[in-house]
Amino acid sequence: MPGGSIYVQPNEKYTGSSPQWWYEKFWREDAPTRRKYRYVKAAVGFVVGVALGLRFGLAGGSAFTGLLLAGAVAGGDWLLHWHAFHKTAVWRGARRGEAITGRILRRSLIRHGYHVLDGRAIRGQASIDHLVIGPGGVWILDNESWAPDIEIACYAGRLFIGEKYGTKVAKPLVEQAEAFSELLTRETGVPVSITPVLVVHCGMLPKEGVVMGEGLTFVKPRTVSRLIKSAGPGALNEAQIELLARTAARELQRV
């Protein structure tokens, strides 16, 4: 059924008449139309493949060339549609954004000397999904998703999420970064400035995959590790990284 997953517990947000439920419903109902157009594209690919075979003197193999190109066209068309649907998985509730981001961070950062802590909070305050400590500094990261057609942009320093201001999204995470900075600096004696990042799993970001504004950085999952590593080494040495990681593990409540 639309909105269902064996890996994610049901949530009212993704059922009934929610945008996610209707998105899946229309997607499934549109499957026959997508197949029809895929057959047409494959047929055109077959004709072009045969023509190319004849053009280059492959009279005996022109049919094979046509079949090969038809298969490539059909496969490419299927892959493009699958990718478009797969990108909405977090928004639809079929996958968890924090699990995706956590896996990306560990695969690409730990070998470069970074520590990744998941699900942390100052006692009595809101939690964040990931805390990253490494040679380039310290980051807190949360995960979010919006409808596929929602554009995220910054104009004249002001964030916009669709037609709404992004201040209500940015302000809490910026404040959490400040609170985490104060706690770690106080407990370790190491001056810390934490960069807040929001990983966007569904929604429209610019081609480069990054939007900055109001103290917050919006980034696509595929770009998040590159963004962190672009800070370069030198902000923290190995002893400071180890001290901050141990202190964070001890002082920040796991949620």
Image: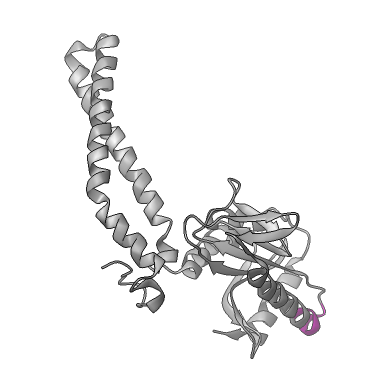
165 on left or right of 64: right
What residue is shown at x 26% (from left), y 26% (from top)? 44
Q: Farthest residue to the bottom: give it.
A: 124
Position of residue 198 in the picture relative to residue 37 (left or right): right
Q: Position of residue 198 (x, y in %)?
A: 61, 65
- Foreground pick, 46 / 243: 46
Q: Main secondary structure of the magenta part?
A: helix
Residue located farthest toward the front when viewing the structure as drawn: 163
| Relative horizontal placement of residue 36, taking residue 211 as reference (left or right) | left
Place residue 237 in its image quadrant: bottom right
In the rendering, at what x and y percent does residue 6 appear?
A: 30, 72
Depth order, front residue of 155/60: 155
Q: Is residue 53 above or below residue 11?
A: above
Q: Visible in this render: residue 140?
A: no
Q: Which residues are magenta?
A: 184-189
The residue depicted at 50 percent of the width and 60 percent of the height is 201
Residue at screen point 33% across, 74% down: 16
Q: Quadrant of the C terminus?
A: bottom right
Q: Is residue 250 magenta?
A: no
Q: Which quarter of the rendered picture does the N terminus lie within?
A: bottom left
Tell me how many marks there are. Answer: 0
Residue 120 x %, y %: 60, 80
Q: Position of residue 37 (x, y in %)?
A: 26, 38
Whether residue 207 appears in this view of the structure is yes
**What colouring method underlies this structural image?**
one colour
| Quarter-of-image position of residue 188 | bottom right
Question: Residue 75, relative to residue 154: is it above or below?
Answer: above
Left or right, residue 178 beside residue 14: right
Q: Is residue 188 magenta?
A: yes
Q: Is residue 185 above or below residue 209?
A: below
